[in-house]
Amino acid sequence: MKPIHLSVGRFNIDIIANIERLPDVDEFMTTDLLEILPGGAAVNYAVTIVKLGHSSKLLAKVGKSPLTQSLMESIAEIGVGLDYVEEVNGPQSMALIFLRKNGKISMVRKLGASTLITAEDVKKYFGLFDVIHFASIPSNVVIRDPMARLISYDPGPFSKDVNEVDVDVLYLNEKESNLIDLSKVRAKIIVIKMGEKGAKVITESQECYAEAYKINNVLDTTGAGDVFDATFNYSIAEGLSIEESLKLAVTSSALKVQRLGGINSPTLNEIKEALKTYTPKVECK
């Protein structure tokens, strides 16, 4: 039986606009790309897990709107289970994403209903999942299910409060890792994502570095970190080594940035095919 993942966090409506610069006051601009897609770190993770071959469920709170329902149906069609998504009387979480030529993004968020998730919401489903991933939510929501095989947390904007969080894997970007005393972090595995510089894993017994997968074009970096998290968790749940898990994760996130939208992640076969073309170097010491 394949492992079941629960991703806890936001279900966003992502509005993506391709622009060269922000318009001035009273200025009107046109764009060649304006898309509305389902998004949010937990959603990006959940979709990637399905594409890799594991079962995936989402725990989130959403506002009541026809657009939200339509976007939820689109990820349900991919295979994400929405049994634990609750409709509430509150505004829908949304993100306005400005996409630049080099694939870099700027973002404006409306947090909305996603802020209503609590640790008690997670507790209700203890014992049902092999892997639980907490994505871009406050640390006071993160709670260990003693029956889960793997608990992970990517704090996103809430990284300053991660030291006492009881998880197996903590995901940080390079900037976040420089603001934290890593020696005080309780997580068994610390993963530092460094974009085009690759990624690093720190455990009690070793430190591993993986170079980035080499690509020529970057379209959209939205969700690349979430795709990395999902691929690394998938690999660990499959019993792969840290080295192999890193190799798959940096390749997966590199394929993602060549595509539009956070949910447009690669399949396991696509990752394997990419590794036939180029294999990132991984060094452990």
Image (spheres, rainbow, N blue to C red):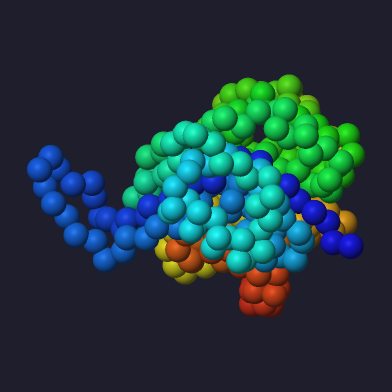
**Residue 95 sits above or below residue 258 on the image:** above
Q: To which quarter of the image does residue 165 belong?
A: top right
Residue 243 visible: no
How many numbered dots are placed on residues in this image?
A: 0
Find residue 227 and report its horizontal and vertical position in percent: 61, 55
Q: To which quarter of the image does residue 124 belong?
A: top right
For the residue pair 57 and 84, the one nearer the viewer reads as: 84
Find residue 87 and report its horizontal and vertical position in percent: 56, 41
For the residue pair 238 and 73, the one nearer the viewer reads as: 73
In the image, what residue occupies the spot 48% across and 58% down? 70
For the residue pair 149 and 114, the one nearer the viewer reads as: 114
185 with respect to 262 (left or right): right
74 with respect to 50 (left or right): left
In the image, what residue occupies the spot 79% across and 39% down? 125
In the image, what residue occupies the spot 48% across and 66% down? 259
Find residue 228 and report its horizontal and vertical position in percent: 64, 53
Question: Seen from this angle, which residue lies furthest left?
Answer: 26
State which quarter of the image contains the N terminus.
bottom right
Find residue 238 and report its horizontal and vertical position in percent: 84, 59
Q: To which quarter of the image does residue 55 belong?
A: bottom right
Residue 27 visible: yes
For the residue pair 139 and 277, the one nearer the viewer reads as: 139
In the image, what residue occupies the spot 72% across and 28% down? 120
